[in-house]
Amino acid sequence: ASRVKDVLSHDARHVEALVLSATLLFDDGKYEQASKAIASALAVNNDYAPAHELAGRIHLVTDGAATAIKSFEEALRTQPNSIRPLIYLARIHLDAGAPDTSLRYAEQALALRPASVDARVLVARSYLTKGDAARARPIIAELENGMPAVATVHNLSAALSVATRRPD
């Protein structure tokens, strides 16, 4: 933190240092200060994707999903091949009950990074939420084979079991 302050004391418009400062404030739960710091970073460079991504994370905590979505979409506009905004967007839409939109973002993330566990989990969860257990099953099986001890994988397996259970 002191190194960031040193950099900013010499160059108050150093966007990477502003984003790092905002990240440290966010991680400390100082959301209002983090919001001001990220606004400063975006004022310096509105095309800096990490600043928009952090703004989205801050908005999720302070303002809600609608504002966060705008920031994550802006991060994608400035850096289309970034997986993190796609993952956040998929999670937000899935939590909001929009599995089709979630699936679209999760599949984009998976196309960019096929080994992404987060993307595969979100694709599977989106299919399950849509009621398409058949499409979720192979993804979940692959996750079970690769990471049998991970709680998220156990939860997906349980959800698949519930989704495919026949009523007595």
Image (cartoon, grey):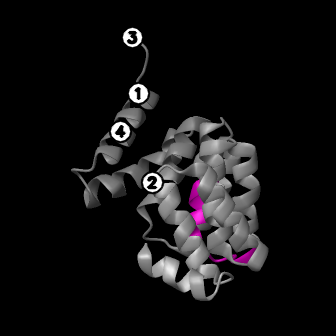
Q: Secondary structure at mark 2?
A: loop
Q: Which residues are magenta?
A: 78-89
Q: Which residue is mark 1?
A: 162
**Amino acid type, mark 3:** Asp
Q: Judge whether residue 98 can be spotted in this image.
A: yes
Depth-wise, is mark 3 or mark 4 nearer the camera?
A: 4
Residue 44 or residue 166, whichever sits in front? 44
Q: Which residue is mark 4?
A: 155
> Can you name the residue that lies furthest to the front here?
9
Q: Which residue is mark 2?
A: 28
> Can you name the residue that lies furthest to the top here?
168
Relative image position of residue 147 (x, y in whole percent): 26, 57
Depth-wise, is mark 2 or mark 3 nearer the camera?
A: 2
Q: Which of pointers 3 and 4 lies earlier in the amino acid sequence?
A: 4
**Amino acid type, mark 1:** Val
**Amino acid type, mark 2:** Asp
Q: Secondary structure at mark 4?
A: helix
**Amino acid type, mark 4:** Asn
Residue 77 higher or lower than 27, as above or below: below
> Can you name the residue that lies furthest to the bottom here?
10
Q: Are marks 4 and 2 in contact (CB under 8 Å)?
A: no
| Residue under the image location 41 percent in, 61 percent down | 117
Q: Which of pointers 2 and 3 lies earlier in the amino acid sequence?
A: 2
Relative image position of residue 160 (x, y in whole percent): 41, 36
